[in-house]
């Protein structure tokens, strides 16, 4: 039942009783207990700093330290008295890409709802340090010391359930080593003895009481009057003796400032408002100042919240009759809003927020995001230190009285998931690529200050694909990739059927090879003769398939020393064998006396354009398509063998294959092309293969599945967009990004990331296609000059 002004009525009744006693007893002594209680009330509200005069940081850490801390591989045990706390840290590595208000609201609220597990207390930890911003979820179970061994299995199952729920909603959470998590939080486990001290306030109270006792026989009333503040101060000091007892400090916190944070907004936000709150919290992602933000969540019983809602409705009913206070009505409205949120599927929590920092920048950012920040001192700082490893120390009976006047520790607030969604990983883990190691910068995202990198060192498979219709900017992007690869020490090699990349490579000071004029040796190379023969037979399936008996016959001739194609064909013709006719198809393209020294070419570490044709006579003529496929197969066999023989594990060469549709189909009679076999077997070695194609159907499906990254260019073609949406798992925002068909727009997907990245390619000027149409001389003249020089 709601009774407004009850506190004031009780105070008035007490005053009336005291006045009656004074009038009856004719003595001031009845005022003394009332004065003691009143002074104690004032001291409980405002005098707590007096209790912590002379208390050092080390003393607070000792008072907050547990008796024992045990670290295991994926959880930790903390013993405090008769209770044991089990902590597991889930490190959130990534969050699916969300951009629309509805998706941000859905993912953020689902994350908070997943932490509403009875028996588990969740702490959201966002820590910004040397390695960037890291996000942890600490799941805590509290059990009696004698039962902890029996409940570990159930605790582990509960943690695993939470982890699976988070993974199901696109949040990549991994169990972290507690040592690493504590190190990121800048919490060290130590063992430092701290000596005890006599509380100055209690000592002063005792001395004053002795003086009052000595004076009492001479002047009873002044002595008793002196005991009034003494009793009040003593009761306050006794409440906080824990800070002076000393002992062993088992933790150390390397933060300069500690704050209690309170969320000022009381209303329950809607979908659009949640997205706005998340955006405001993302400002913390970009600051350089180190900080640790902790949001402690304790699941609240829904029935208890519903009971509060019923009491709040009583207050509002009394307000309609004019019999309630305005402050009570405002609180009741907030609670009723929480009840409405529960009906919409939200879950209730008791929560509180702490901030540890070395500077003022995080404080300013939180202040602009509707938070009140106050420095923590005394018992509230002690409570924070205790919360880092366990929870607030228990309150004595006298401390509970003080807690009703002024909370001893940082108080919990009641909230629902829609209010707490701003503290989800979507606010702190912005889906950005990392420019570490040999990452290749491709361009920027929607915002120009958000660069997008191809994370070469982090890719589980270095081979990729670049797909886009004509005019989408594929060639420009491929040249840009080559330039950025050179910046990090990776040598680009272009397989160029049409001669398009020839002037670009010459401009870079690279080497242009016309494979028909300087062919590869077909039966000599970095791999053994048997492997070369098997790959030769496989490649011949593109031109004129060979049987095993014909391959065996060629092998016998190779053993006799026939290594040149012309001499091999002549010997087969003398023997009257039909396989000579098949080899005749290759002879015009692989009979030049000049042979390509591929190993020497790679050692020079200069860009290479491998043109599948000839420039003899001043005009470029490409090989027939089937011979191109044969030549590429042989080339890929040679270069793979060279890289493997050198034992290269890091990417040293970037092989860009233009017109990849030519080389993405398997030879007749075989299940897959050589490019797919390499993508399967050699996921991380010294050669990265990029197939540049016009359409998804041009690719071998197995290569597409095994590729470590995909880059889809923009186009307005409905058919292309439909297939791209399916194969790239595009969301609404990503699909709209591509559907406008603007040149240079793309979506990047990397196998080790759970989401896509919007990309606007930033090409170098020399990489643009229109640059070469505008600046380059006529190719025929260049080829003619090259022919004359020969």
Image (spheres, rainbow, N blue to C red):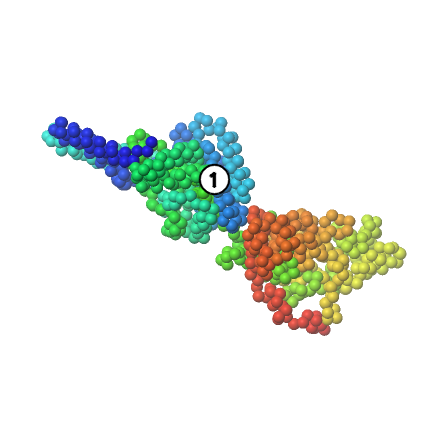
- Residue 663 appears in the picture as rendered: yes
Drawn side of residue 228 relative to residue 86, left or right: left
Residue bearing the label numbered 1: 344
Residue 79 is drawn in which quadrant?
A: top left
Drawn side of residue 613 relative to residue 183, left or right: right
Q: Position of residue 23 (x, y in %)?
A: 13, 29
Q: Residue furthest top?
A: 146
Q: Residue at x 55, y 52 (%)?
A: 733
Count the marks: 1
Residue 620 is drawn in which quadrant?
A: bottom right
User: In front: 651, or 239?
Assistant: 239
Q: Residue at x 73, y 71 (%)?
A: 618
Q: Residue furthest left?
A: 218
- Residue 359 appears in the picture as rendered: no
Q: Position of residue 434 (x, y in %)?
A: 52, 52
Q: Residue at x 40, y 39 (%)?
A: 336
Q: Position of residue 123 (x, y in %)?
A: 44, 40
Q: Position of residue 665 (x, y in %)?
A: 72, 53
Q: Residue at x 65, y 67 (%)?
A: 503
* Relative vertical location of residue 391 with respect to residue 720 in this rendering, above or below: above
Q: Circle 1 sits in a helix, a strand or a loop, which is it?
A: loop
Drawn side of residue 582 relative to residue 783, left or right: right
Q: Quadrant of the C terminus?
A: bottom right
Q: Quadrant of the N terminus?
A: top left
């Amino acid at each position: 039942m709601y009774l407004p002004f009850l506190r004031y009525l009780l105070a008035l009744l007490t005053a009336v009783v005291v006045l009656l006693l004074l009038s009856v007893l004719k003595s001031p002594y009845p005022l003394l207990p009332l004065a003691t209680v009143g002074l104690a009330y004032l001291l409980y509200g405002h005098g707590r700093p007096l209790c912590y005069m002379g208390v050092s940081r080390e003393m607070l850490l000792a008072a907050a330290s547990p008796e024992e801390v045990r670290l295991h591989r994926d959880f930790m045990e903390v013993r405090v008295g008769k209770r044991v706390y089990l902590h597991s840290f889930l490190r959130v590595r990534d969050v699916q890409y969300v951009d629309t208000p509805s998706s941000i609201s859905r993912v953020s609220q689902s994350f908070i709802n997943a932490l509403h597990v009875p028996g588990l207390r969740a702490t959201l930890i966002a820590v910004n340090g040397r390695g960037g911003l890291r996000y942890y979820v600490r799941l805590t179970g509290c059990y009696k010391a004698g039962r902890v061994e029996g409940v570990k299995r159930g605790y582990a199952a509960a943690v695993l359930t939470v982890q699976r729920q988070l993974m199901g909603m696109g949040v990549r959470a991994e169990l972290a080593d507690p040592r690493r998590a504590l190190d990121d939080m800048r919490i060290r486990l130590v063992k430092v003895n701290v000596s005890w001290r006599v509380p100055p306030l209690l000592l002063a109270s005792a001395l004053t009481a002795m003086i009052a006792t000595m004076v009492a026989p001479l002047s009873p009333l002044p002595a008793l009057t002196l005991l009034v503040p003494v009793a009040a101060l003593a009761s306050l000091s006794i409440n906080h003796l824990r800070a002076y007892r000393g002992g062993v400090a088992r933790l150390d916190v390397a933060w300069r400032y500690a704050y209690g944070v309170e969320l000022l907004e009381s209303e329950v936000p809607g979908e659009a408002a949640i997205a706005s709150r998340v955006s405001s919290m993302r400002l913390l992602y970009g600051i350089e100042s180190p900080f640790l933000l902790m949001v402690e969540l304790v699941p609240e019983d829904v029935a208890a919240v519903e009971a509060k809602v019923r009491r709040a409705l009583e207050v509002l009913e009394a307000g309609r009759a004019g019999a309630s206070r305005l402050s009570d009505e405002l609180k009741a409205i907030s609670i009723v809003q929480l009840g409405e949120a529960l009906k919409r599927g939200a879950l209730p929590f008791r929560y509180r927020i702490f901030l540890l920092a070395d500077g003022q920048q995080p404080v300013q950012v939180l202040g602009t995001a509707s938070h009140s920040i106050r420095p923590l001192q005394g018992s509230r700082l002690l409570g924070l230190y205790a919360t880092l490893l366990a929870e607030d120390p228990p309150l004595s009976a006298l401390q509970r009285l003080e807690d009703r006047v002024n909370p001893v520790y940082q108080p919990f607030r009641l909230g629902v998931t829609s209010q707490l969604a701003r503290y989800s990983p979507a606010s702190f883990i912005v889906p950005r690529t990392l420019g570490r190691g040999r990452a290749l910068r491709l361009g920027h995202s929607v915002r120009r200050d958000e660069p997008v990198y191809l994370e070469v060192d982090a890719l589980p498979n270095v081979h990729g694909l670049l797909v886009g219709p004509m005019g989408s900017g594929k060639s420009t992007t491929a040249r840009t990739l080559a330039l950025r690869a050179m910046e990090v020490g990776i040598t680009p090699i272009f397989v160029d059927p049409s001669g398009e990349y020839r002037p670009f490579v010459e401009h870079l000071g690279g080497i242009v090879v016309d494979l028909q004029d300087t062919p590869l040796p077909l039966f000599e190379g970095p791999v053994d003769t048997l492997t070369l023969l098997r790959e030769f037979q496989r490649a011949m399936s593109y031109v004129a398939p060979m049987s095993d008996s014909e391959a065996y016959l060629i092998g016998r001739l190779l053993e006799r020393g026939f290594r040149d194609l012309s001499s091999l064909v002549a010997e087969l013709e003398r023997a009257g064998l039909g396989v000579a006719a098949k080899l005749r198809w290759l002879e015009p393209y692989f009979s030049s006396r000049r042979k390509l020294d591929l190993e020497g070419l790679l050692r020079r570490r200069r860009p290479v354009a491998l043109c599948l044709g000839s420039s003899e006579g001043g005009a470029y003529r490409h090989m027939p398509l089937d011979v191109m496929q044969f030549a590429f197969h042989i080339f890929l066999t040679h270069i793979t063998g060279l890289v493997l023989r050198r034992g290269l594990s890091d990417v040293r060469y970037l092989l860009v294959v233009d017109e990849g549709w030519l080389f993405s189909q398997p030879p007749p009679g075989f299940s897959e092309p050589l490019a797919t076999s390499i993508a399967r077997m050699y996921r991380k070695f010294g050669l990265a293969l990029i197939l540049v194609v016009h359409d998804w159907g041009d690719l071998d499906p197995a290569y597409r599945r095994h590729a470590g990254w995909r880059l889809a260019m923009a186009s307005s073609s409905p058919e292309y967009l439909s297939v791209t949406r399916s194969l790239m798992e595009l969301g609404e925002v990503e699909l709209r990004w591509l559907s406008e068909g603007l040149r240079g727009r793309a979506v990047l997907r990397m196998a080790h990331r759970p989401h896509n990245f919007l990309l606007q390619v930033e090409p170098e000027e020399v990489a643009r296609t229109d640059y070469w149409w505008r600046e380059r001389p006529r190719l025929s003249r260049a080829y003619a000059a090259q022919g004359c020089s020969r």
